[in-house]
Amino acid sequence: MIRRLLAALPRADRRRLRVGVALTVISALAQGAAYALAVPVLRELLAGRPAAAWAPLGWLAGAAAAYALAHVAATVYGRRTGYALARTLLHRMGNQVSGLPLGWFTPRRSGELAQLATRDIMTIMSAPGHLLGPVLTAFVTPAAVAVVLCLLDWRLGVAAVAVAPVIVASYWWTGAVVRRTERAAAAAAAESAARVVEFATVLPALRAAGRSDDGLASLEVALSEQRAAGRAMARRALPAVAGFAVAVQAALTAVLVVATVLGLGGRLDAGTALAALVLAARCTEPMLVAAQLGAAVRMAGNALDRVAALLATPALPAPRRPQRIHGDDIVFTDVRMIFGETRALDGVSFTIPAGGRTALVGPSGAGKSTVAALIARFHDPDAGTVRIGGADLREVPTPELMARLSLVFQDVYLFEGTLWDNIAVGRPDAEAPAVRAAAADARVDEIARRLPQGFDTPVGPGGALLSGGERQRVSLARALLADSPIVVLDEATAALDAENEAAVTAAVERFTAGRTVVVIAHRLETIRNADQILFLDAGRIVERGAHDALLAAGGRYAGFCAQLAEAAGWQLRAVTADPAAPAPQ
Ligand SMILES: Nc1ncnc2c1ncn2[C@@H]1O[C@H](COP(=O)(O)OP(=O)(O)OP(=O)(O)O)[C@@H](O)[C@H]1O
């Protein structure tokens, strides 16, 4: 464990851990010496020679003082190392996470990350701060005492040392059991954390569909699995911890029996026998505590494994031969994208010409969002290439790609800053009039007028103080300000009310004119104005062309449009269904 903690620490903090461990060992040895020096003191006192007890008593006081000083210093070093460890690991995790492909961030991963950054980091931090000291002391002090017993009387020493292998073996067994069962318990905890995140995310949709109980049911299943894993851990670890306690008690009993037999037989003086009994009893308690703390050390080891796994997650590889983007055309060549068992894209090839508008259409799960995600390089494809302006996206530095793209996705996330900051992030060097113009185009100025501090109003974590439609308008303003030549829109106006939708759609139309636009939309008006329509199904492009040509072909797209028209007609008829109903005044 110490080796692994050293590996996790930066060079500057490793010395602190080494010093802390050395001080712990010194304090444990001093404690052992202080215990052992009680033997000559007791021996002299019981033999009626109090004057002769002064010398060992002085040594005992010295050892006790050395123990106290080393113990305090070791505790301070341990705590500081714990903080340094937490700081370093959180920093490294932050750096790592910021370099991971955006497609990595699913609700499950968010749950795991939350567990890692909170529970696991606290567990790891406690290892040098609170655990290593008592665990080391629990073994070093009895070892020192055993050495002293050997010097006092070899038979007592043999009794103490004979049971040491049993104690050490049962300590490792306890650790192995805890380590195994804790992994399952931690996986169950991460699963239920992910379910909580997911439940909070989908609750509005579930409630709208009157099915909140469905989400609650999967959350309850995860929570009861977590409870079961916790119980299984306790059930399996308990016998191991109890076995260790029995081994420690057996060691104590062995020393007690040998000391008593020798004392009664007159082969050991009363003072030494009594001191041996006291010493053996004194060492028992810290060893029993060590069994429990040892389990916590194993949990810290598991937590370190999980952090190491995150740190080893491959980031999007940096370009080996960085290429510049020359142009705005987007070309997919035989692209495959597989998520687990799902072929999200299965050998897709197409060209999105520069300056044109391409609509991605198809049933749910067809792969439309995956196309958009690959254009923004949220992932690299499993096979094939995605090129923009002739450059393979794997070879394009991220800032170069992001300068070319504006993304307006369905799930809008705002960061915890002001309304203004959330728009200006689209182009940090933008002058105030440009930010205001973008805000006005996306109708964010209306929102600002309503808020107490106007554009300087904080929007809360994730933009929580704004409604879904308002967040979408802010994200549109951001894209308008960014003024990028390529725009990817995913259901960009889905959360807007009718009036705002019309206004924002007009702004988007103006803004996207002449740019390369890739739009995922289910509304007929958006789709039919596209220069090119790519109809996807089950990860393949099944039809492509312009609206009129595809309609005339009478294929899948034509059927899809008929469904959309029928749905629109159904809405119309539903409103005017009852001719006898009184007209609104
Ligand atoms: N990160 C992911 N992990 C696992 N599976 C994924 C992931 N992203 C997409 N998929 C799967 O890939 C398939 C295509 O998904 P995609 O979101 O691209 O479809 P879509 O056409 O955009 O659907 P919708 O219109 O419903 O948003 C689906 O089966 C989906 O479950």
Image (cartoon, rainbow, N blue to C red):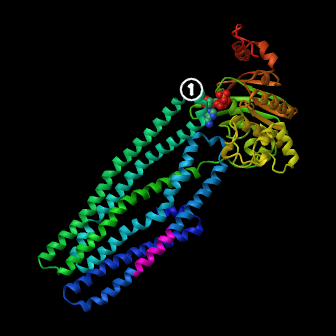
Task: Give residue 516's position: percent from left, percent from top.
Answer: 83, 34
Furthest toward the left, the residue is 265
Write down the region rendered in magenta: 65-78
Residue displayed at 58% across by 52% down = 311
**Residue 391 seen in the figure:** no
Q: Secondary structure at mark 1?
A: loop
Residue displayed at 29% across by 55% down = 242
Q: Quadrant of residue 296?
A: bottom left
Front residue of this view, candidates 54 and 498: 498
Residue displayed at 51% across by 44% down = 190
Quadrant of ligand 1: it is: top right
Front residue of this view, candidates 398 and 199: 199
Furthest toward the top, the residue is 580
Task: Give residue 53's position: percent from left, percent from top.
Answer: 27, 88
Left or right placement of residue 391 versus residue 177 in this view: right
Q: Quadrant of residue 67?
A: bottom left
Three-letter code for the amino acid on which mark 1 is drawn: Gly
Task: Give residue 248's position: percent from left, percent from top.
Answer: 28, 63
